[in-house]
Amino acid sequence: MADTENKAPESGAGIPVSWFPVPEESELPEGLRRLFSKARETVGFVPNVFRAYSFRPERLSTWFSHFKMLHEPTDNLSVAEREMIAVAVSMENGCLYCLVAHGAALREALGDPVLADRITLDYRRAGLDERRCAILDLAVKITNEPIECSPEDIEYLKGHGLTLEEVWDVIEIASMYNFTNRMSLACGKIPNEEYHALAR
């Protein structure tokens, strides 16, 4: 449980944002303080994942750089599709934090909150086209049966118009969210209440 001398801040209803201690923002390196400030400017709050991950500040910096890189859109794999991978993997893993946070990001990226919520909860019944279903099917396969992945999976996505680099991105994004889901679940991370109202 959290060290009582450095108690984790609460995220509504008296629930701590993490089961690990969360440093005061003033204790963080300058680069992370700038990251927190930028988050307040762009979304209006500091995501609790930043606060929780700041328990190991050098790793937060590395993780966030990787995260940003994977969410850069390319010609055949949009920001919205990258967020779809995030929520499809997070639903398979039952990750509360990532479902709430990336569900909000998907609503914003799509500009269609109803479709975004349907994809977040069950992409198979959301009316997606074959191409997007193929992308998410591979993300779920990586999550549940990675040993069953094969060269045919790569060729199948290439057949739906993705470049080899974009297929790599699908695999890497799905793999990263399996990591972040497990970190969130094992550390007891709770999403900010503000996410629930975003892009509605």
Image (spheres, helix red, strand yellow):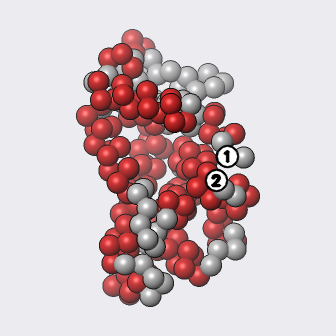
Q: Is residue 156 visible?
A: no
Q: Which residue is mark 1?
A: 199
Q: Amino acid at mark 1?
A: Ala
- Measuring from the top left, give residue 60's x and y in whole percent: 33, 37
**Displayed quadrant of residue 62:** top left
The reply to whether the C-beta atoms of the residues labelled 1 and 2 are less than 8 Å apart is: yes
Q: Amino acid at mark 2?
A: Arg
- Measuring from the top left, give residue 180's x and y in whole percent: 42, 49
- In the drawing, what numbered circle is on residue 145? none
- Please name the residue shown 49% across and 74% down the image: 135
Q: Which residue is mark 2?
A: 107
Label 2's element?
Answer: helix
Extreme residue in the left direction: 58
Q: Nearer the viewer, residue 67 or 9?
A: 67
| Looking at the image, residue 84 lies above or below residue 68 | below
Q: Is residue 127 left or right of residue 192?
A: right
Mark 2 crowd level (few <14, some 14–19, many ≥20, 10 Å Cα): many
Q: Is residue 117 left or right of residue 103?
A: right
- Measuring from the top left, give residue 93's x and y in whole percent: 52, 56
